Image (cartoon, rainbow, N blue to C red):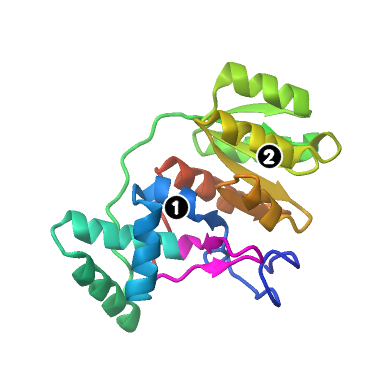
Amino acid sequence: MSLPAGPLAGDAPVYGTGDRPIYGISAVARMLDIPVGTLRTWEDRYGQVVPARNAGGRRLYTRQQVEQLRFVRARMNEGAGVADAHRLLAERAETAEPLSVSPQGSAPRPLIQLAESDAYAAEFEEYFLKAAGFEVEVALTEAAARETFTVARPAVVIVEVLISGGAGLDLCRYFRERGGAAVVVVSAVAAMEAAMDAGAGAFLPKPLDPLHLVSTVRDLLGSGALLAR
């Protein structure tokens, strides 16, 4: 599946499910509890995990790169120095050995809010999120989405750009300003750069892959078991 035209500077490359850049650096820092400055330093010093850049210069990480950073963090937690952890990561890359990431424990049932313009799409997304063990609240208008957010206090909000005639990015800013929830922006139009500028933690193009949607939500909650290779 290829990215919509325009999210990255230059020609848009073709990405697979695990190597599409979708996460902003702030979201990655929260997911892994690694300071943004540290991620930048590791990128410059070791060159093992180098994210793509959008037209505005923002770093965008793939799920595979998040997996690599999780591997580095796990090795450091085991007592390895940062340089040794990156050396081990490089060795895994050379041998194509799957990364060893500690399994995640069972997670509670966090609340996911859908702010979606299409009732059928909302039903589709709600089904797969509930099947994955999440509680879900659906709002089909901008006003309903704001009210639901205030009352329900979701852990993650999934926002369609075209809700209420194109109010999705304003909603994204609204949610981020109030804090407490990660925001995923979804759209059938090329809106990655605008979504990141609005404070989204991740951007997913439509049509959505349901398994990718669930994995992205889990990653932003910090409970994701990233694909091992």
Residue 68 is at least partly visible in this image:
no
In terms of secondary structure, where does tag 1 sit?
Answer: helix
- The amino acid beneath tag 2 is Val
- Using a 10 Å C-alpha cutoff, classify the residue at mark 1 as few (fewer than 14 neighbours), some (14 to 19) or many (20 or more): many
In the displayed orientation, state which residue is furthest to the top.
151
| Residue 138 x %, y % | 68, 28
Q: Nearer the viewer, residue 30 or 93?
A: 30
Q: Residue at x 83, y 33 (%)?
A: 164
Q: Nearer the viewer, residue 156 or 132?
A: 156
Q: Which residue is mark 2?
A: 159
Magenta segment includes 55 = yes
* Magenta segment boundaries in residue numbering: 49-64
Q: Residue at x 45, y 40 (%)?
A: 221
| Residue 21 x %, y % | 56, 63
Q: Give the answer, above or below, for where 52 lies relative to 199.
A: below
Q: Give the answer, above or below, for where 139 lies relative to 127.
A: above
Residue 1 is at least partly visible in this image:
yes
Quadrant location of the N terminus in the rendered image: bottom right
- The amino acid beneath tag 1 is Val
Residue 229 found in image quarter: bottom left
Task: Tell me whether the residue at label 1 lies in contact with that at label 2, contact meaning CB atoms closer than 8 angstroms.
Answer: no
Q: Residue at x 57, y 67 (%)?
A: 53
Position of 190 with respect to 22 (left or right) is right
Magenta segment includes 104 = no
